[in-house]
Image (cartoon, rainbow, N blue to C red):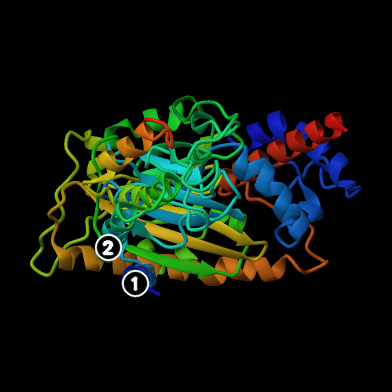
């Protein structure tokens, strides 16, 4: 898959990318195709530069469907959660009717931050500055004294035009996906293949609650966390415990160019309590899932894992070129799972994900080396990671082409 | 500062929206002019909106009838 993909796709994206990066390094020599990082040393050092971080924010994270948070973070109508994402103040909200909505967290009057801490909106969202009020659906419902003291209407202030600014959002696998640019294809179309692949898990997922969420802050570029998650090559070395029952040869690549990539295992062993009890399975799964598990990155920043009895979602929040926050959530097939078993599962995954920290942080430090030429991909083992690189390069090249055309 | 003003300031300081709905309505009832009444009713209405107070609809209706607010 990788070598075929190399020949077909990365050459054109490489050319575009190198042209726009002004990169004269020839990393595309004959015979190195399958193994080289075609994007060269400048691509490798993209993890370091604030300017590139900002450009990738626009090209990779704002233009498509990025994970923002999980819907379980606002479980009840009126729950409001302010979130800073890519430098944007956003408001995640569950409206009166129970729908999850995302807005820019600013008043339409003077751009004041509306909600500065998680809280319950009992009635309307009142701006703390001049008290313009919005419904939980985003409708502007009051503009007090806008026409003078005691006069709450004014010419030129049309409430119907001044609702909260919505952000396109979609909830799937409990992840709240957003499209900040507003012009991406509909989520259902953009991720049609992945939704079809995991249609068996498109059913109620029950968040395990406070014991089933945790956060890790890692000193690396967000893309390195994706790269590491995509491949199984590192498992025997970095996760020897996992490798004792799910060997490297039990794994397979998952490769959907331009959309997602990752890895699966044919050998998933259920987590059990002290007396051998396990979690209930999701209903109506096909036999494959008796022993299989899959781990996929939905580009750009959502890492998902599915098993017969639990699912997890990791939303990567890029905070700086060398700092990423990982928000991890675990889900089960029923709302009444055993707390001790949930705690054991959370502890297991926290242990595994912490094992990865030295790797992603080590790669980040390594990106400072002027001697690093972009590295070499294994033709056999690095395909899913290479696909992510290709997606990044294609998106960046397209973004820069658009910018040049606009100029 | 009269007693009502003191109670209003205390309600503001405590962020007690329910008390402000009550106190601003009390102030509106004591208002000496229509604009003053509209001002206090507006204050009461905003805090009522914020907490989904039972008086929200009647306060809005009063302001609408005074020509000071648009219907929802």
Measured along the vertical axis of the image, is residue A189 above or below residue A47? above
Q: At x 49% / y 54%, what residue is drawn?
A: A114
What secondary structure is marked by label 1?
helix
Which quadrant of the view contains residue A108?
A: top right
Residue A16 placement, left or right of A159:
right
Mark drawn on residue A209: none
Residue A204 placement, left or right of A71:
left
Q: State the residue position of label 2.
A: B19
Measured along the vertical axis of the image, is residue A17 above or below residue A318? above
Q: Are marks 1 and 2 in contact (CB under 8 Å)?
A: yes
Give how far apart the Cα atoms at labels 1 and 2 are: 10 Å
Chain under numbered label 1 = B
Q: State the residue position of label 1.
A: B14
Which quadrant of the view contains residue A134?
A: top left
Residue A304 position, x and y percent, is 41, 48
Q: At x 38% / y 60%, what residue is drawn?
A: A118
Residue A170 position, x and y percent, is 42, 36
Residue A358 placement, left or right of A98:
right
Q: At x 74% / y 36%, what residue is drawn?
A: A399
């Amino acid at each position: 898959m990788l070598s075929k993909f190399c020949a077909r796709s990365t050459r054109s994206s490489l050319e575009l990318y190198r042209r726009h990066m002004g990169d004269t390094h020839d990393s595309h020599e004959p015979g190195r195709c399958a193994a080289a990082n075609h994007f060269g040393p400048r691509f490798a050092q993209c993890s370091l530069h604030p300017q590139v971080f900002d450009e990738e924010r626009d090209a990779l994270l704002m233009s498509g469907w990025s994970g923002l948070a999980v819907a379980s973070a606002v479980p009840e109508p009126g729950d409001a959660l302010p979130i800073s994402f890519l430098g944007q103040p956003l408001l995640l909200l569950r409206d009166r009717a129970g729908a999850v909505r995302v807005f820019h967290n600013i008043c339409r009057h003077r751009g004041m931050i509306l909600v500065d801490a998680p809280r319950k909106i009992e009635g309307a969202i009142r701006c703390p500055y001049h008290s313009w009020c919005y419904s939980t659906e985003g409708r502007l419902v009051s503009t007090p004294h806008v026409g003078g003291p005691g006069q709450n209407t004014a010419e030129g202030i049309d409430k119907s035009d001044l609702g909260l600014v919505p952000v396109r959002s979609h909830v799937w696998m409990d992840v709240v996906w957003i499209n900040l640019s507003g012009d991406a294809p509909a989520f259902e179309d953009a991720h049609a293949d992945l939704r079809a692949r995991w249609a068996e898990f498109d059913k109620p997922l029950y968040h395990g609650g406070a014991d089933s969420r945790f956060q890790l802050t890692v000193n690396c570029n967000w893309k390195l966390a994706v790269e590491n998650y995509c491949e199984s090559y590192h498992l025997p070395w970095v996760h020897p415990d996992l490798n004792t029952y799910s060997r490297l040869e039990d794994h397979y690549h998952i490769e959907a160019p331009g959309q997602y990539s990752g890895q699966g295992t044919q050998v998933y062993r259920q987590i059990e309590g002290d007396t051998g009890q396990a979690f209930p399975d999701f209903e109506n799964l096909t036999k494959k899932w008796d022993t299989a598990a899959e781990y996929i990155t939905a580009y750009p920043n959502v890492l998902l894992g599915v098993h017969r009895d639990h699912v997890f979602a990791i939303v990567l929040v890029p905070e700086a070129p060398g700092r990423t926050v990982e928000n991890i959530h675990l889900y089960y097939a029923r709302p009444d799972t055993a707390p001790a078993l949930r705690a054991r599962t959370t502890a297991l995954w926290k242990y595994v994900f912490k094992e990865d920290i030295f790797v992603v942080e080590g790669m980040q430090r390594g990106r400072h080396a002027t001697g690093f030429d972009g590295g070499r991909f294994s033709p056999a083992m690095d395909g899913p990671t290479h696909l992510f690189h290709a997606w990044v390069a294609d998106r960046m090249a397209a973004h820069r082409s658009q910018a040049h055309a606009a100029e | 500062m009269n007693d009502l003003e003191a109670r209003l300031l205390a309600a503001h300081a405590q962020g007690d929206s329910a008390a402000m709905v009550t106190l601003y309505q009390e102030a509106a009832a004591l208002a000496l002019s229509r604009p003053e009444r509209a001002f206090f009713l507006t204050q009461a209405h905003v805090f009522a909106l914020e907490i989904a107070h039972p008086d929200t609809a009647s306060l809005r209706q009063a302001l609408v009838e005074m020509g000071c607010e648009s219907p929802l």
